[in-house]
Every structure is written in structure tokens, then in C-alpha cells.
Image (cartoon, rainbow, N blue to C red):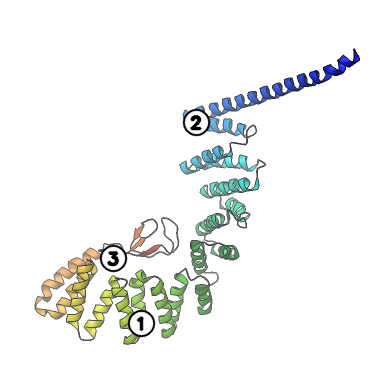
Amino acid sequence: MLELLFLLLPVAAAYGWFFGRNSLRQEELKNKANVAKNLSSGLNFLLTDQEDKAIEQLLQLLDIEAATIDTYLALANLFRRKGDWDKAIRIHEKLHQLKLPKVQAQQIQLELAKDYFSAGLYDRAESLLRKLVDSDPLQETALKQLFAIFVVTHDWHKAVEFAPQVDKTDSRSLRIALANMRCEDQKKPMDVMALRILSQKYPQAIRPRLQLARQLLAEQLLADAAVAFKSVLTQKPQWAADILPELQRCQLPEDEWYPLLSQLVHKNKNITATMFLCDWLVQTGSPAAGEQLLLEKLQQQPNIRLFQRLLQVRQLNQPAQMEALQAIDGLVRAYLDTKILYSCRNCGFKTRQQYWLCPSCQQWETVEPLSGIDGR
């Protein structure tokens, strides 16, 4: 009988394991059914525009099922895009309280910072982002979001704190932003030496070099100013419309001025340079050559400003028609006075005023002189 008892023990153990496993499976199925029920209820609230009830229902699920984090992130981002920042914040704050893997937790922290930024809670957003700037996967994104806060709050000096982190990234836009915010910081105005250092450290940005050139020109250091102006033109020939009038004041010798203008005209097809070259030909006693240059360029690239300059040169060459040409010139001038001068290459924002920071897309150094039929 005792031997039979020992034989029955494995059977009893197997029986217990089977029913225990079955009980766990039943409990798991029950939990999944509850999750599905609550999720269905939450979605139904969303569909019937009862968003507050929907959020309460869905947030309860976080304690039951943390594997659906991506779904909650998508939902919170949807609320943020709609402008429902408080709802996005509630979801992200609840997610932020969960014990999650580091990468996932940092992503939620970044999303929560974006919510705070959208809601105008800049100090909270800055506090979260400062913890992410040394995180390799999110460093560049966190820095860009931080810089967006500094732009809104005009805390330009804070950007300088993050120069080491910016230098570790490959982001050209961050370097340009940092250089521009340093130029904006009126608490620490820069002299010629500081501008030289800044322009050498961040050659991607043109503002420090242009500011350096203008400072040198103001101090009558004409040769150094000319070098700085020409370096900007080499990198950004489209800025000739703003730079050439100032560069002309540097009194370049003719053997430097003419080749510079010629390159901008023939290689870069710059409108302002064409007008300057025409003026140089007229001043050196070749008004016919100046008129011929304008005619050739108008055939290659029609432009209202070149046409206006042609009218002015014709007045010199044909005094008998001066009255009629002056009347046409006046009409063209009135037309051009209404036209935009600058356009953002990033978002297309158009303006008659030059901005270092685009008022529309908030990008640095994207607003440039306009090209085309009305361009310069």
C-alpha cells in the first residue's frame, strides 16, 4: 500500500501543476479582458468627444498594462498638436512616473518638456531638458529645444553654457544658433577680438564675420574690413545686395574691385553685382559697355531692377529721351517700392526687413536677399 502511495505522488503533483497553471491562465485572460474592456471604453469616450473621461479611463490602464507606451505617446502627441497641452501633460506625467527602461524614460521626459514648452511653462521644460543634454541619443534634440526656450525668453547668455555639448554634435544649425545668440547678448558686447574668435570658432555662421567687418569699417580699419566682407561674400554671394555698398566704402583698388564684381556677375549671376559693375563701367568712361552688359544680362535673366538701371544708363546715352525715360523710371521705382526684399529659404516667409531669426520658423540665418525677377 505504501508503494502505491509513492506511485500516486507524481500524479498528484502533475494534477496540482496543471490546475495551478490553468488558474494562472484564467487570471491572465481575465486581466486581458479587463484591459480590452477599459481600452474599448476609453476609445468610445474619445469618439463621443468626452475627452476628459477618456483620459481618466486610459490612464487607469497604465497601472495594468505598461506595454502599450507607444500608444499613449501617440495619443499625448495628438493632444499636443491639437493644442490640448493640459491633456498631453497629464498623460506624459503619468508615463514619467512609471519604472521604464532608461531610453524609454528619457524619451518620455523629452516629450513632457515639449508639452511644458507648448504650454508656456518654460522653467519646467528647461529643468527637464538640462538633464538630457548629456544623453547621446537625445542630445541634439534636447539642445535644440533648450535653445528654442532661450529664444522665447531672450536668455541669450544661457546658450553659452552649452557650448561644449554643441561642439560634440554634428549639427550645423546648433552652431549657427549659438553664434547668433552670442551676438544677441547685449550684456556682454563683443569687441573686434571677441568677434574674431567667435567667427573663427563658428565659421558656419555669417553674422559674427559680418558684424566684425562692420566694426572694423566703423574703426576705419579698411583693409581688414574688406577681408572680412569678402569672406562673407565667398560663403554667401547672395548677400552681395547688402554687403557691396559697405564693401565699396573700404576703397578697394580697381585691380581687386573689378575681378570681385566680375566673379559675382558671371559665376554667381548676382543682380546687385551686375548693377555695380555697370556703374563702374560708366564711371570709367564706358557707358556704352555698361548698357551692353545690362542688355546681355537681361536676356539671360529677366529682372526689374536691371531694367530700371538700363533706363538710367539710357538717360546718359540718349539725353533727348530723358523726359520719357524718367517717367518710366518713376513707375518702375514705385513698383519696386512695394516688393519684398528678403525670403526665408526654410519656410518661405517674405519681408522687406532683414531678420537674423526668421519670425515664422524660428531658424537662424535663413532669411536672405530675394532672387528672381524682382530680386536683388
Label 3 – label 1 distance at C-alpha? 23 Å
Q: In which quarter of the image is the C terminus?
A: bottom left
Residue 48 position, x and y percent, is: 47, 28
In the picture shown, does residue 206 fall above or below 90? below
Residue type indicated by callout 1: Arg
User: Residue drawn 23% across and 86% down?
Assistant: 284
Residue 372 relative to residue 219: left or right = left
Question: Relative to 287, does residue 113 appear above or below in the rendering?
Answer: above
Asked whether, in this view, residue 83 is left or right of residue 105, the answer is: left
Q: Residue 236 placed where, x, y %?
A: 39, 70
The amino acid marked with disc number 3 is Gly
Farthest residue, direction top: 1
Q: Say whether marks 1 and 2 touch (CB < 8 Å).
A: no
The spot of residue 321 in percent (x, y) is 10, 75
Pick out the residue farthest to the right. 2
Report the side of 21 relative to 206 (left or right): right
Element class at badge 1: loop
Badge 3 crowding class, 10 Å Cα cut-off, few under 14, some 14 to 19, many 20 or more, is many
Task: Give SS at disc 2.
Answer: helix
Q: Which of marks 3 and 2 is nearer the N terminus?
A: 2
User: On the image, numbered disc 1 is attached to which residue?
Assistant: 249
Q: Could you tell me which secondary element the residue under label 3 belongs to?
A: loop
Observer-side mark, 3 or 1, equals 3
How many numbered marks have been drawn onto this rendered protein structure? 3
The percent position of residue 300, horizontal first and vertical second, equals 22, 68
**Nearest the eye: 137 or 338:** 137
Q: Quadrant of residue 278?
A: bottom left
What amino acid does circle 2 point to?
Leu
Which residue does the numbered mark 2 point to in the structure image?
46
Q: Nearer the viewer, residue 17 or 74?
A: 17
Q: Name the residue under label 3.
A: 375
| Residue 196 makes an appearance in the image | yes
